[in-house]
């Protein structure tokens, strides 16, 4: 268990205050995002808070990524939501039951992959592939889910490249929120304090207050509704539902592991891919009994945590402690929160994710035409075909590049070996030459 190794070496005087501030900040972000990602996954909102607390805490004991923000994430939640929507009602199983059974299967797949030492497959998830894939998934999230959730009454566009047109309409409607947040609000606060109150929390608090005082629910505006308080009941996932969810589980596990590993490697030099499989697997297997969905590493939360000064997983443990008390006592506070506000919060997070991924594109152009092609082909496959096809295209192209570089390396090594052999042969000839001429030289001297 990695925590046994790093916790005794923890530098309390140097690292605790930065980790404390980062933990408080990410806890504030976890609350609105957890509720929003649960809606994206087609389960009751409290699932997101349970996942952010319990699954993340289990990961802190088994994971090797010191810098990160684990919990519910956008891409995995979207894929879980699709699987839940497709299978809801099958054999009488409802959304929450299907999500728990799917999380059980995902955890089992991770543990099996750990036992087979398949962490080496993380090398397939090269940056151009994961960047293009995550960008495409983010666009799918915006277009397929958030437009109706936000209640934006815009005429949908169909046909070739319809995702781009629909995305443009939605992003235009909410772009000013992102601009004010990233361009004015957050930079202003950074000048005066290391603790940054996320704009998502401010929007959520104002929305809850207005909804309560003006009775948004009575006006017909969709709200979160009942949010339970106290610890979750231990409910074992249904093996019956698990039996027909292995296909979606494989897809979610592969995609979630690829995106999580690629994002985690950006902030952690030392990472054990096999141990990460075990950490994700144990988190899912234990917490699927506590109404949790599959976890991953969030790029946006990690970037914010790093900007505040996070050093180790202590920040995640602090966040889990805060969320634990939120779950115990603050459930009714979120009941009047409008669904459209959660959609807006999720929209901002997804747009920031897209912007972060697009920043890598100029680097691909400068370094390699092949990297640029992998990024574009993966993104195109995700947008124009489907997420599954995008995953296949990205893996095939990544393997082609890796094997091609391996062949070039082998050929270069052979060439060096041949040159070395030739040089060694010439050296031997030069050493033997004086010995062959020695007798004749003696005769001449006589």
Image (cartoon, rainbow, N blue to C red):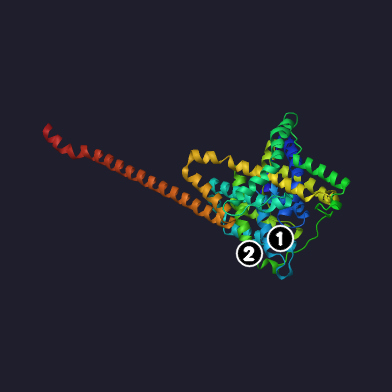
Q: Quadrant of residue 441?
A: top left
Question: Which residue lies most toward the top here?
Answer: 191
Q: Nearer the viewer, residue 74 or 240?
A: 74
Task: Say what secondary structure mark 2 lies in.
Answer: helix
Q: Earlier in the sequence, mark 1 or mark 2?
A: 1
Above or below, 195 against 98 in this view is: above
Residue name at image x 79 percent, y 47 percent: 323
Instruction: Name the quarter where the C terminus is drawn.
Output: top left
Q: Nearer the viewer, residue 383 or 252?
A: 383
* Residue 308, percent from left and from top: 71, 36
Q: Name the residue tied to disc 1.
A: 99
Residue name at image x 56 percent, y 51 percent: 122
Q: Is residue 206 left or right of residue 132?
A: right
Residue name at image x 87 percent, y 49 percent: 215
Question: Which residue lies most toward the bottom here?
Answer: 91
* Residue 13, percent from left and from top: 73, 34
Bin the neighbour count of mark 2 within 10 Å (Cα to Cα): few under 14, some 14-19, many 20 and up.
some
Q: Is residue 390 visible?
A: yes
- CA gap, disc 1 and disc 2: 12 Å
Residue name at image x 18 percent, y 37 percent: 438
Q: Name the residue tied to disc 2.
A: 246
Q: Are marks 1 and 2 in contact (CB under 8 Å)?
A: no
* Residue 15, percent from left and from top: 71, 36
Q: Nearer the viewer, residue 234 or 369?
A: 369
**Labelled disc at residue 180:** none
Q: Is residue 258 left or right of residue 200?
A: left
Task: Say what secondary structure mark 1 lies in.
Answer: helix
Bin the neighbour count of mark 1 within 10 Å (Cα to Cα): few under 14, some 14-19, many 20 and up.
many
Q: Quadrant of residue 284?
A: bottom right
């Amino acid at each position: 268990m990695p925590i046994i190794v790093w916790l005794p070496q923890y530098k309390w005087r140097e690292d605790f205050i930065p980790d404390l501030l980062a933990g408080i900040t990410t806890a504030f972000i976890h609350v609105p995002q957890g509720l929003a990602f649960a809606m994206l996954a087609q389960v009751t909102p409290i699932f997101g808070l349970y996942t952010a607390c319990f699954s993340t805490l289990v990961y802190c004991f088994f994971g090797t990524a010191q810098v990160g923000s684990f919990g519910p994430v956008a891409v995995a939640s979207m894929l879980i939501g699709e699987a839940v929507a497709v299978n809801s009602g099958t054999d009488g199983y409802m959304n929450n039951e299907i999500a728990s059974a799917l999380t059980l299967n995902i955890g089992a797949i991770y543990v099996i992959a750990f036992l087979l030492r398949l962490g080496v497959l993380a090398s397939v998830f090269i940056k151009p592939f994961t960047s293009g894939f995550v960008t495409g998934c983010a666009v799918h999230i915006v277009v397929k889910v958030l437009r109706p959730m936000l209640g934006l009454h815009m005429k949908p566009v169909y046909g070739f490249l319809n995702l781009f047109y629909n995305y443009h309409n939605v992003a235009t409607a909410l772009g000013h929120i992102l601009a004010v947040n990233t361009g004015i609000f957050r930079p202003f606060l950074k000048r005066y304090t290391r603790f940054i109150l996320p704009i998502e929390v401010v929007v959520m608090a104002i929305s809850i207050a207005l909804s309560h005082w003006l009775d948004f629910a009575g006006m017909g505006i969709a709200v979160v509704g009942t949010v339970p308080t106290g610890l979750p009941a231990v409910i074992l996932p249904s093996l019956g539902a698990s039996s027909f969810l292995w296909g979606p589980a494989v897809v979610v596990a592969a995609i979630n592991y690829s995106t999580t590993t690629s994002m985690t490697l950006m902030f952690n030099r030392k990472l054990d891919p096999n141990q990460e499989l075990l950490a994700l697997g144990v988190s899912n297997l234990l917490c699927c009994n506590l109404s949790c969905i599959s976890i991953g590493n969030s790029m946006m939360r990690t970037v914010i945590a790093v900007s505040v000064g996070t050093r180790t997983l202590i920040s995640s443990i602090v966040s889990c402690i805060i969320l634990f008390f939120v779950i115990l006592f603050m459930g009714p506070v979120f009941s009047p929160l409008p669904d459209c506000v959660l959609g807006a919060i999720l929209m901002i997070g997804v747009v920031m994710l897209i912007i972060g991924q697009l920043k890598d594109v100029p680097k691909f152009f400068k370094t390699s035409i092949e990297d640029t092609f992998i990024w574009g082909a993966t993104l195109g496959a995700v947008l124009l075909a489907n997420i599954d096809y995008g995953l296949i295209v990205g893996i095939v192209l990544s393997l082609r590049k890796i094997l091609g570089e391996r062949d070039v390396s082998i050929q270069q090594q052979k060439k060096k070996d041949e040159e070395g052999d030739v040089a060694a042969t010439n050296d031997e000839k030069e050493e033997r030459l004086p010995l062959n001429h020695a007798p004749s030289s003696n005769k001449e001297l006589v």
